[in-house]
Amino acid sequence: MTSTALSRKRRLLLLAAWLAYRCAPQRGFAMPSPSTVFPEAAPSEGPKWKPPDGPGDIETVSVQCLPSKILADHSIGTAQMLALRGILGGSVYAKTLRKQVLQCSREERSVIIFGEPGTKKDMLAFNIHFARRKGRLLFVDCGGVSSFGARIWGRQGAPGLLDVADEGTLVFNNVHQLNRRLLPAVVQLATNGTYWSRNAKQMQRSKLKVILISEEQTGLADIPKEAAFRIKVPALRVRREDIESIVRYELRRLGRTEGRAIPDITPEALKRLQAYDFPNNVQELFGLIENACRNLPENAEALTAELLWTAQSAQKLDLFKVNLLDVYPGLRDFLRSDWLENLNHGFTKYVFAVLVVLLFVGPQTRDANVGLSVFWAWWWPGILLTYPLLGRFWCAVCPFMIYGEVVQRWRVASGAVLQKWPAEVGRNGGWFLFVLFLGILLWEELWVLENTAYLSSCLLLLITFGAMVGSYFFERRIWCRHLCPIGGMNGLYAKLSLTELRAQNGQCKAVCNTFHCYKGGPEEGEGQETDGCPLYSHPANLKDNKDCVLCFTCLKACPHRNVMLSLRAPGVDFGFPFLFPIPGTAASARHEASAPEVALLFLLLGAVFCHHLPELSAQLGAPELVASFSSHALLATAALLGPGLLVLCADRAARLLSSAVEPKRRPLNDFVELAYSYLPLTWLASLAHWLELGMTEAGLLLPTAARTATFFVPAVGDAVDPAALPTLVFAPAAVALVQGALLLAAAGFSLQLYSKLGSKDAPFAWVHQLMILALTWELWQLIL
């Protein structure tokens, strides 16, 4: 066929289409490719559009905008035709939404509904309409409205939706997707009910109640509050207690729809849903339930957690945790018993008193006083070894706070009302314990506390006195949480622990409204009566192990079995398991970085240098520095503060050079955050130092105890020869081997942690790597 014939045929088809349009202007019909492009015009002037004069203009006509189809296209039926779910649940949020829907249905004001995706905001609008019982429900998806909006506001010779619609409700869905040119017209309609009719070329008033649905309020802020009622639909993650009601309703609805028995849901499956954050909110929950019912075996009577496997926490690091209470069910009963109370107030309280008296009145050297040996050769290495496994558990059995509890119980029994914690303690407590620890370390070094029994006893009494004073005035354990230097050290090292005590955040928010684990309270279900967490920490809100002493009060108080004692990979608090650097497991760090804690970290690192002042002064070529008290004090202060100041100066120099040489590149992360890279170095270097006493003197416990007994009862020396008692002492080479291995591991773990906390691509990022290696090398020289 020739091109002339094709052109003739095309003109005939266009002419036939034009004639059909002219003969039946009120009947919509399909065009092969209708265009929606219309000439633009200001709303006040109306569109400069005219009916086509000939076949050549037909391609610019959108026949779907014809009035005969407008109402049919935008009407979405009646309440009987819609699967209205209503507002389910008994939470405060659900009750508030129901009140707001009722109020909106009684008023003629416009309504603005906003919230996250998937919160079923359109269903809320439908409920408002059907509660009004006026007119029809018209629905406009703003994402599909053309830039001209002819179907809504009409055009010359063709009325729009607003022109032909009578009384009812007009819902604009996804207003945030509407073309910005049309937004002022929507705002005007919602504000005073008027609009510019392009067909009538004049301002008209609509009888429709306008409901605007958006994921954000951007662009709608110009609507005054007296003209529009605003409803913020909460996300599902903040109303988790409604999840059970929503699930059970949906199961009944699906059961009736599919003509099958209504399935139940297991408690484990419900917990999984309540622990999930639901990025797509209620819509995602409906999809999960529908999919689980579809995959439910025929003979199954309930949804199990396996059918809801997609509703899992997005935290990749949860893969590195195992709940020990599920693996060993008997462990829960043991931890909920009174074993800790019996240990503290039936044993430790009295043994500690005997130890303090022994240090005062017994021999004053470590080789003759078993109490001094236990304190320095057993306790210090032992507590450093417990951090990787038990975290801050020492604080749960600490004798200092046991006597604080004695004072507190006496005060409460006498009718006293203990004070709440002042806010200043939380803000400045970290610096207080830093200064106190600095003074203790200087006292220890200058007065040789590790070989002077009565001074070591004074140190123990000083810390006990602080705990007792804090407990006399304030409730719970203010001393342990904010002021105790040993507690600050324990909280710092506990971030490397293999265990953690946590609760499922979603379950706590969904089913618990008493928070007895945090506030304290009477028995509730299987939950015991408690006074609440002694450190005022909620197990679901803990970001790291710093403020958890593993006292298991929350485990005893929880009636929902929601508290978990988990075995985890170390490094989880810092965003990744650094002993198992598996690709894809990195996440945002959850620990709370703070400047006082970083200062304490470097102070503890400086303490290792301070314990080796003779070797350090020998390196400086001035061994006489430790001979006089004044020079000894200056050198000790420099050793304690020097490592931290050196690292800080190196960091500042790297940042200055980075801004000068490569100002456009991303700088290093904040110093307070990346300073935690030195935590493995600090802990393992301290362990390497104290392990020498543990491997050489801890095994002399029996001979030392015999000499102590001889001091009080000389006849014991005639009956028992201390030199003949069994001992366990490691050779110097074995001690050096262990110390060297610890220092190498310290450097490796710190470098690995820095690779995660620091900015890999930042200029001069290698400065901190160099500092870690330099400090490790210097510690190697001093300790070995």
Image (spheres, helix red, strand yellow):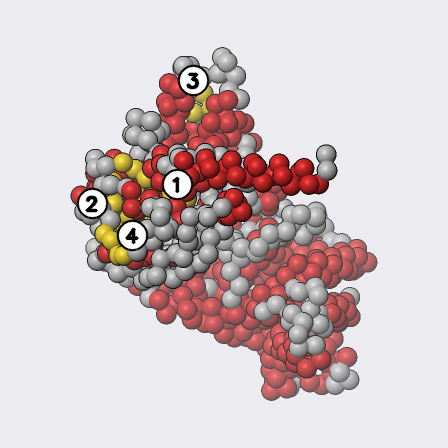
Name the residue rendered at 55%, 32% in the picture. Answer: 309
> Which numbered circle lies on residue 66?
1
Lower position in the chain sequence, tag 4 or tag 3: 4
Above or below residue 518? Residue 64 is above
Mark 1 residue element:
loop
| Mark 2 neighbour density, 10 Å: few (under 14) some (14–19) many (20 or more) | some
Residue 711 visible somewhere in the drawing: no
Which residue, given by chain and number where applicable, does mark 2 sit on?
103
Lower position in the chain sequence, tag 4 or tag 1: 1
Rendered location of residue 337, percent (x, y):
42, 36
Name the residue rendered at 39%, 40% in the picture. Answer: 66
The foreground one among 330 and 1 is 1
Lower position in the chain sequence, tag 2 or tag 1: 1
Mark 3 residue element:
helix
Cα distance between the residues tagged 3 and 2: 35 Å
Lower position in the chain sequence, tag 1 or tag 3: 1
* 1 and 3 marks in contact (CB < 8 Å): no
